Amino acid sequence: MDVLDLARLQFASTTIFHYFFVPVSIGLALIIAIMQTMYVVKKDDTYKRMAKFWGTLFLINFAVGVVTGILQEFQFGMNWSTYSRFVGDVFGPSLAIEGLAAFFLESTFIGIWVFGWDRLSKRVHLLSIWLVSLGTILSAFWILTANSFMQNPVGYEMVDGRAQMNSFSEILLNPHVWSQFPHVLLTAFATGAFLVVGISAWKLLRKQEVEFFKKSFNIGITVATLASVIVLFTGHQQAQYIVQSQPMKLAAAEAQWNTSDDPAAFNVFANIDTENRVNTHELQIPGILSFFAYNEFSGSLKGMNELQAEYEEEYGPGNYIPPVKTIFWSFRAMVGSGSVMLLLGLLGIFLARRETLVKNTLYLKVMVFAIALPFIANSTGWIMTEMGRQPWVVFGKMKTEDAVSSSVTFNEVLFSLISFTTMYSILAIVTVFLFVRHIKKKNHNVPEIDQQNEHDPYDKEGTNIVS
């Protein structure tokens, strides 16, 4: 391994770890807002308690997400300073707006929501959690505008070897943003929802506060299923955009070395020989890849060998084929996880409507482990997205090998990698501990003080509780 390999490994590990928390914050914020809305509309205190219970998990997750996000940004100056100088004038405004507008919106109204339960009217307090949810969504949008420039650079001009923004509107209207943003947002909603569903299933298995967690389950499974259904359409739209913008990425995701037949078949399985650029064994479904690409069962797609020749002619000599095996299996892990999520969601709604959910212990046990599915789908989806762009860090403009800092040494990057990994491991342990401790608490259906008031208006020390 060299400095470039270590820098890429460090950025990949810290980014994936940080992204464990981002979709949970987005998804939980929406679900908590829905629960609190039902409390205001139905005037049922159960929904208020639900908002507070899940709100505690949201706050823990949000705090850790902030810490991991800050550490991640350090790397732009540490290991990728050449990249930062090249793209900073375009990349910087999006990150600045995300921090100064979206993140401040989240943080401000999180504080109002936490401390405003007994100080604000119900409707004003409800507005605060919806603004928190909006802030999480806006944060994702601004980060994706920056990422989309790396995938499809627009709205810039080259000045003295650096990219400078010349059209902010083009950055905002980048077609890659509007292909990627809906898909990422819906997967985040599904992630938060599956967390709620899985924890509720764990509680129901132990017969703890059954009515409380049945209601939580019903809200979570509804959001999870709706999000999983819509994700199919947004993913389909994104695949069609990639056919036009980054055909090499789609060809790698299909392990398609040569231009396909018409119609193009979808590879369910392939034994990939990257040295000889062939697949020795394939299991295919005829016509499906053409439908994914063109919405009809006809049409061929270019293979990696043909695209490699085109890229060499356009960009000069070099290897423009990304890591095929990684992208191929990442894509299938993403699609497979998403498909299982949809099936489990539909089954959960069916069982909930039949009032047989609590009796179906096998399903509840599966849903506890199903918490992992959206995290697998998110991580493998981003691996495909980012590695499928290789060898480019900014597609067509800057290669990854040219973006690494020229002044850092192997030992310096190794030290930061070990340091970050250690800190993230500690954060992971603390987060799991706090989550488990809160989940195991018994959240009584009737507040403890009210239970005591039914028998005695005074506490043990003689203080009048009612007054």
Image (cartoon, helix red, strand yellow):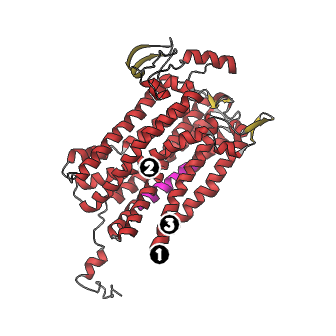
Against 291, residue 346 (above or below) is below
Asked if 5 appears above or below 305 in the picture, the reply is below
Q: What span is colored magenta in the figure?
A: 55-69
Q: Are marks 1 and 3 in contact (CB under 8 Å)?
A: no
Q: Are marks 3 and 2 in contact (CB under 8 Å)?
A: no
Please state which amino acid type lies under the numbered disc 1.
Answer: Ser
Q: Position of residue 446 (x, y in %)?
A: 28, 72
| Quadrant in the picture for the C terminus | bottom left
Q: How many marks?
A: 3
Task: Identify the residue at the far left of this view.
Answer: 359
**Is 396 situated left or right of 334 in this image?**
right
Between residue 245 and residue 66, name the one nearer to us. 245
Identify the image quadrant of residue 216.
bottom left
Q: Residue at x 39, y 47 (%)?
A: 226
Residue matched to label 1: 121
Question: Can residue 418 be spotted in the picture?
Answer: no
* x and y, in percent, of residue 132 in the image: 51, 60
Upstream in sequence: badge 1 or badge 3: 1
User: Which label's residue is closer to the chain start, 1 or 2?
Assistant: 1
Q: Circle 1 sits in a helix, a strand or a loop, which is it?
A: loop
For the point 51% across and 44% down, which residue is it? Answer: 182
What's the CA distance linking mark 1 and mark 2? 28 Å
Residue that badge 2 annotates:
189
Q: Residue 104 appears at what percent x and percent y?
A: 60, 60
